[in-house]
Image (cartoon, helix red, strand yellow):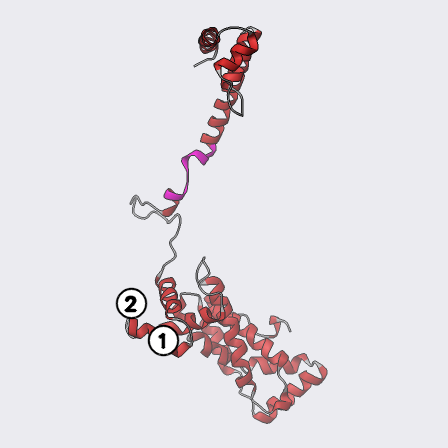
Amino acid sequence: MSTALIPAVSASSLEAYIQTVNRYPLLTFEEEQDLARRWHDTQDLEAARKLVVSHLRVVVSVARHYMGYGLPQADLIQEGNIGLMKAVKRFDPERGVRLVSFALHWIKAEIHEYILKNWRLVKVATTKAQRKLFFNLRSLKQGLGSLGATETAKIAKELGVKPEEVREMETRLSGQDICLDPTVEDGEETYSPIAYLASPEDEPVEVLAREQTERLQHEGLTHALASLDPRSRRIVEARWLREDSSATLHELAEEFGISAERVRQIEAKALKKMREVIPA
């Protein structure tokens, strides 16, 4: 069933949309049953359309109850309409109930899902118990202050959850999303979260400069090592450039058949020569 069956809803034309859906006539029980059977038995799209549009005002009414979550009413209605179409698709006229009773569950389910996905960047309710808390905690709280132990226990008992789950959801609901890089107004300097999250070392200019410095240092080191005699180069590499543990003076002394003090002298002379070759 396509959304093309119903009028489009947008924030710019919301009032016009509401006026339009309120003009669609309500169906009698007999009319509803006849249309539902036509859709159920023969997949008559016109019958399905009439069932949907006659209940669009119900979606508008339900969506109004979820305005406190800071999401556009037009979007809430649109999601509710999807739930309504799912209800019409699954409605069995032989059960003898009105479509509105059956559709309320589907309308609310789609709106709930939309709110949970879009109300915050971080998910606030993932389990069934958390969803129940999310949509009932505000109405059960007495006042705007934090919950006390007694009130927390009462709400937990009423909703069939643990007191700690109530406290956790209250904390989640009381948090606010913050723009990482807000617009600066009136020339005021602001310190947004992006200033604390961004690392100056990751700036493109810094990365390029760091790579260039590392390249020059590598080229300079290679040139400096090439200026040494084989023994001096071996000693410097073994003492300073090995990735594993460095060689000791005594190990190199044994390798070259000289004293450890002589190895130290060669090392010192080689490092001095390298410093003169490597550009500052």
Between 95 and 61, which is closer to the camera in this rendering?
A: 95
Residue 121 in percent (x, y) is at 45, 57
Quarter of the view holding residue 198 = top left
Contact flag, marks 2 and 1 (Cβ < 8 Å): no
Residue for point 67% across, 87% down: 37
Position of residue 74 in the picture relative to residue 192 (left or right): right
* Number of dots carrying numbers: 2
At label 2, the amino acid type is Ser
**Residue, disc 2:** 146
Q: From the top left corner, tell me how far across and down residue 13 is, in percent.
A: 47, 69
Residue 163 location, quadrant: bottom left
Q: Does residue 60 lie above or below 199 as drawn?
A: below
Q: Residue at x 49, y 7 (%)?
A: 259
At x 47%, y 27%, the residue is 210
Q: Residue at x 52, y 79 (%)?
A: 105
Front-most of residues 195 and 161: 161
Q: Amino acid at mark 1?
A: Ile
According to the picture, the residue beneath numbered tag 1 turns out to be 155
Determine whether, in the image, residue 181 is placed left or right of residue 56. left
SS at circle 2: loop
Which quadrant: the C terminus? top left
Q: Secondary structure at mark 1?
A: helix
Helix, strand or loop for the magenta stretch, by majority: helix
Q: Which residues are magenta?
A: 196-204
Q: Is residue 208 above or below residue 248?
A: below
